Image (spheres, rainbow, N blue to C red):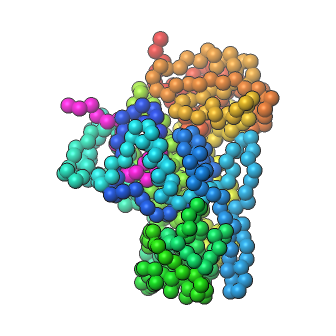
């Protein structure tokens, strides 16, 4: 009998692909299947938040993402003959603790392409035209049936992750509820097309009566716009260049605007749903399979990527011998985050119909830099903290001599950061297991602002998880408290 795979992933969008990338760089045996015949071709989710850019830095794709994206253009709100300029984002300068402070604009097909290229660099490949049809699981494995051109194939893996979208076969097969609503009466036509008669330096918005609006966002480094046209409840969505052009001209009252070379078209209905659980046994949900959002605020794709980034290192650690209870923390940490993000994106979307200025403005809440796991199973309350950080918070960047702290964090390892002589001595004494994620140790001082970025006041020892969150802070009892924390995160240390 063939040795089981480590992880089978269903769904090759950004969530599934980030998970595959993270697992492959940890040396695991992974397959990623997708029922579509080819990679997604539309712009759909196009906003990349600062925290996601940090993930892309860690997995080695940030350069390609920055090359293929742009800052968000200013809005141009058309009110009859008047166009009102509006800045959706207040662009900020890089700081020591936040190296990528601004949301980037990049169509999803390009994000998928960059991630799939990285997957192949690591020896993986998306298996298109391969549909998950069902699965069974026992105490040690999951056996899935995968359909393809050559008929059904039985695939056995130690774990299965469903990143297969809002209509997830994995979620349905688990019998998990998908709680929330689908607003069938509220539809939006989304079209990627070459457009004449519009300047490409604005995201154009035309408000309309009863919450109807049209918008056209220029897609960076192309001659395409993504059109968003909110339809009336009984309106038949137009199809084809001529019909869509007539619909746009009727709404904008501008007969010089026309679309051609339509690359992608879809009719969107707001889904606002959250899975009742993220796990059953050896099967997990991530991304849209676990939560679906309105498009406002650019949260769905980014939240899915964070799901994968949270789950990947935990799967790898358990496969290397860590306590399986570590996997319980995935749902405990990620489900509350998704619930909060759903509330945020829904509020933003509902405000668009009223042209509520707060619904057009984007800021700290959307950027996902302040999300925390504090109070969860891996970050209990009442532990040591610094002036500005608690266990479970994002570990900030900081300038170091000739480099950045994120350069040290980059990779599939834990990092132990020591500030002060006592903390450095404890760091040297800490034993680390030979299996699972390795440990990188660094001692820092305050010559380049670490103290300010981390809010430390005296000797401090910090354990940074592989996903860039603080796993432990010790300001006293450095060695014993850090050892106690690592027991829940790593395989047993053998002597």
The magenta stretch is 1-20
Residue 139 can be seen in this image: no
- The residue most toward the right is 447
> 223 or 238: which is nearer to us?
223
Q: Residue at x 47, y 11 (%)?
A: 495
Up the image or down, 35 lies above or below 56; here it is below
Q: Residue at x 71, y 79 (%)?
A: 83
The image shows residue 33 at horizontal and vertical percentages of 34, 49
Figure quadrant of residue 362: bottom right
Q: Residue at x 70, y 61 (%)?
A: 89
The image shows residue 134 at horizontal and vertical percentages of 26, 51
Screen quadrant of the N terminus: top left
Queried whether the magenta region covers residue 37, the answer comes back as no
Q: Residue at x 73, y 47 (%)?
A: 94
> 463 or 91: which is nearer to us?
91
Judge from the rendering whether residue 445 lies leftward or rightward of residue 157; answer left or right.
Answer: right
The image shows residue 485 at horizontal and vertical percentages of 56, 27
């Amino acid at each position: 009998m063939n040795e089981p795979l480590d992880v089978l992933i269903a769904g090759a969008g950004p969530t599934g692909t980030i998970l595959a990338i993270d697992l492959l760089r940890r040396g695991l045996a992974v397959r990623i299947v997708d029922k579509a015949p080819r990679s997604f071709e539309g712009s759909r989710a196009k906003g990349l938040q600062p925290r996601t850019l940090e993930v892309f830095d860690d997995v080695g794709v940030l350069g390609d993402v920055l090359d293929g994206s742009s800052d968000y253009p200013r809005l141009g709100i058309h009110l009859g003959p008047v166009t009102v300029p509006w800045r959706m984002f207040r662009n900020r300068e890089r700081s020591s603790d936040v190296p990528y402070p601004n949301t980037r604009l990049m169509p999803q097909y390009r994000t998928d392409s960059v991630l799939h290229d990285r997957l192949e660099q690591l020896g993986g490949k998306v298996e298109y035209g391969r549909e998950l049809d069902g699965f069974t699981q026992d105490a040690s494995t999951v056996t899935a049936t995968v359909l393809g051109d050559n008929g059904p194939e039985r695939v056995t893996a130690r774990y299965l992750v469903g990143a297969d979208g809002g209509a997830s076969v994995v979620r349905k097969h688990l019998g998990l509820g998908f709680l929330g609503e689908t607003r069938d009466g509220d539809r939006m036509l989304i079209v990627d097309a070459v457009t004449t008669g519009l300047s490409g330096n604005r995201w154009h918005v035309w408000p309309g009566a009863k919450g109807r609006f049209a918008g056209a966002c220029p897609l960076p480094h192309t001659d395409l716009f993504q059109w968003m046209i909110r339809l009336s409840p009984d309106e038949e969505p137009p199809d084809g260049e001529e019909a869509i052009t007539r619909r746009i001209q009727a709404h904008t009252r501008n007969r010089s605007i026309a679309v051609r070379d339509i690359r992608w078209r879809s009719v969107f209905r707001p889904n606002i749903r959250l899975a009742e659980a993220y796990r059953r046994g050896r099967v997990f949900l991530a991304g849209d399979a676990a939560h679906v959002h309105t498009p406002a605020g650019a949260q769905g794709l980014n939240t899915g990527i964070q799901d994968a980034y949270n789950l990947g290192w935990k799967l790898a650690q358990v496969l290397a011998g860590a306590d399986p209870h570590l996997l319980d923390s995935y749902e405990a940490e990620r489900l509350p985050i998704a619930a909060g993000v759903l509330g945020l994106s829904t509020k933003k979307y509902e405000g668009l119909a009223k042209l509520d200025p707060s619904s057009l403005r984007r800021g700290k809440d959307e950027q996902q830099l302040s999300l925390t796991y504090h109070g969860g199973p891996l970050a209990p309350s009442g532990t040591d903290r610094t002036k500005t950080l608690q266990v479970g918070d994002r570990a900030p960047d900081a300038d170091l001599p000739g480099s950045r702290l994120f350069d040290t964090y980059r990779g599939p390892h834990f990092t132990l950061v020591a500030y002060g002589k006592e903390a450095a001595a404890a760091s040297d004494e800490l034993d680390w297991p030979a299996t699972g994620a390795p440990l990188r140790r660094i001692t820092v001082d305050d010559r380049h602002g670490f103290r300010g970025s981390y809010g430390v006041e005296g000797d401090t020892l910090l354990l940074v998880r592989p996903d860039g969150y603080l796993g432990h802070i010790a300001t006293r009892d450095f060695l014993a408290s850090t050892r106690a924390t690592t027991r829940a995160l790593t395989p047993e240390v053998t002597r």
